[in-house]
Structure formats: structure tokens, C-alpha cells
Image (cartoon, helix red, strand yellow):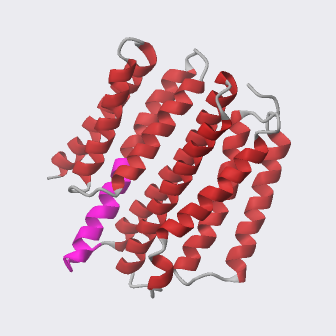
Amino acid sequence: MKIKKYIKLVIPSFVFFIMMEFFFKSFGLSYASLITLFLISVLSAFWITRYRFLPIILVTLWTTGSVLFLITLDENGFQQLYIAASSFIFAFALIGLYRFFIQQEKWIKKEEIKLKVLDSGFNLNQAIILISIFLISSGIYSIYTDLNLPLWIILIIIFATIFFSTIYLTRINFLKSKAHEFYLDSSKNKTFVFYSFLFGLIIVELIWAISFWPANHLTVGAIVLSIYYPCWNILRDYLRNNLSKKVVTLNSLFFITFLCITLLTGNWKIS
């Protein structure tokens, strides 16, 4: 059984790596490899989680971010390292999906579950989503500045990224809270679309403002992440009824500190 589980993780990650290589090196196979890359990601998540549709959001965001950021890299040895790293992290994404959703399935069936495994799966899911937000924001902004695309196209893509990221995170937070038997306010935890729309709107307004500055794409990605992460932390504790002045203060300090570091160390030349 363990061998079968490892095969489920290793084979999709290896194919992910191969398709990323094809997409990068072979112009003739780029579209075919790109489609295959997304199919492998979606089918792997579907298979790992025993035919659940929610995890498709996570792997789609990760694959999109991996491809977009790869396009921004100059032709050097770092690209190969990046492809290997993105494939390695994809394997961790599958591990996170397996740990979280399989434990959820056991909880639904009223079987004994391992809360530590569930929590580690949740944390991996959360980390992959946050990294994906950075990669997509950085990658698409770089393409926007290089190709001089209409700003509205970039805003729609980033809005969709934040919208679906927040839907996914609020949903798995709800599932985790139920497994931990936290008190849940149904009126708060069932309005996923509202929170997702609100977060997307905030980030889109931010990108629109940044578009007037000579901001590097990495700086843009860092700024988006520095705003989204503390906002998500506050929302998560609010949904769990754990919101306090301490939580708001700590996350506000994190936001101010990280934003200041980004603004002071960022490259303010478009490249």
C-alpha cells in the first residue's frame, strides 16, 4: 500500500518535470506540453484525493504560476534548477492534498483520524497557494511589462488568482475546523465567494496603483504577497472565532515590516 502511495506521488511529479522541460526547450511541442502539463496536474490531484474536485484549484494555480514564472527567467542554468524545484514542490503539493483530504474522508466516515497529519496537510496546502500567488503575480506582471499588454488583462488574471485562492483556503479552513470540532458560525463560513471577491478587489486595486510606478515584477509579487498573507491570517482566525487584538496587531506588524523591507530593497526599474 505504501509503494502504491509513493508511485502516486513520484510518477506525476516526474511527468510534470518532463513536460516543463518540453515546454521550455521545444517550441514545436510547447502547446502540447503545456496542455499535458495541466492535464497531469489535474488528474494527479483528482486521483490522489480519491476523485475530489476542490484540489484541482490548488494544482491549477501551482502549474499556472510555475509556467508564468519560468517564462520570465533569462536563458541560463537557473532555469533548469527552477524546473527541478517546481517539480519537487509539486510533489509536496500532492503530499499535502493526500494528507488533508484522505484524513477528511476518514473523518466524514467517522473513522479515527490523525489530526497532526491533517494539520500538516493543511499547512502544505496553504504554503503552496501562497507561493502560487507570488509566482503568478510576478510572472504575469513581467509579461505585461515586456509585451506591453492591456492592463485590464493582467487585472483579470490576478483577480481570478486571488479569487480562487481565497475560495480554496476558506473552504479547507472550514473542513479543518469541522474536523477539530471548532465552533463554526455558518453565516461566516459559508460566504466564501464574498471574501474571495473582496480580497480579489483589494489586490486588483493595488496592482492598478502599482502599474503607475517603475516596479520590477519581483517587487510586485512580493508586495501582493505581503498584503495577502496577513489579510488571510486575520480572515482565518475570524472564521474560527479566534480573532483578537493580538492577532490583528501581529499581522499588521508583519505587513508593515515586510512591506517596508520590500520597498527599500526592491528593484524599482522595470525589467
Residue closest to the eye, 192 or 3: 192
Which residues fall within the magenta stretch?
92-113
**Does 139 sit above or below residue 119?**
above
Place of residue 238 in the rendered image (x, y in percent of width and height, measured from the top left)? 58, 78
Q: Position of residue 270 (x, y in %)?
A: 77, 28
Q: Between residue 149 and residue 121, name the one nearer to us.
A: 149
Judge whether residue 131 can be spotted in this image: no
Q: Residue furthest left?
A: 1
Q: Position of residue 94 (x, y in %)?
A: 34, 49
Figure check: 223 above or below 195: above
Which residue appears at 32% of the width and 60% of the height? 99
Residue 86 highlighted magenta (yes or no): no
**Residue at (39, 19) in percent of width and height:** 30
Is 226 rendered above or below residue 77?
Answer: below
Number of callouts: 0
Q: Is residue 237 visible?
A: yes
Residue 119 pos. (x, y %): 42, 67
Q: Report the side of 8 relative to 248 (left or right).
A: left
Q: Is residue 86 left or right of residue 210?
A: left
Task: Report the magenta stretch's main SS.
Answer: helix
- Answer left or right for 167 relative to 232: left
Question: Which residue occupies 56% across, 53% down?
Answer: 162
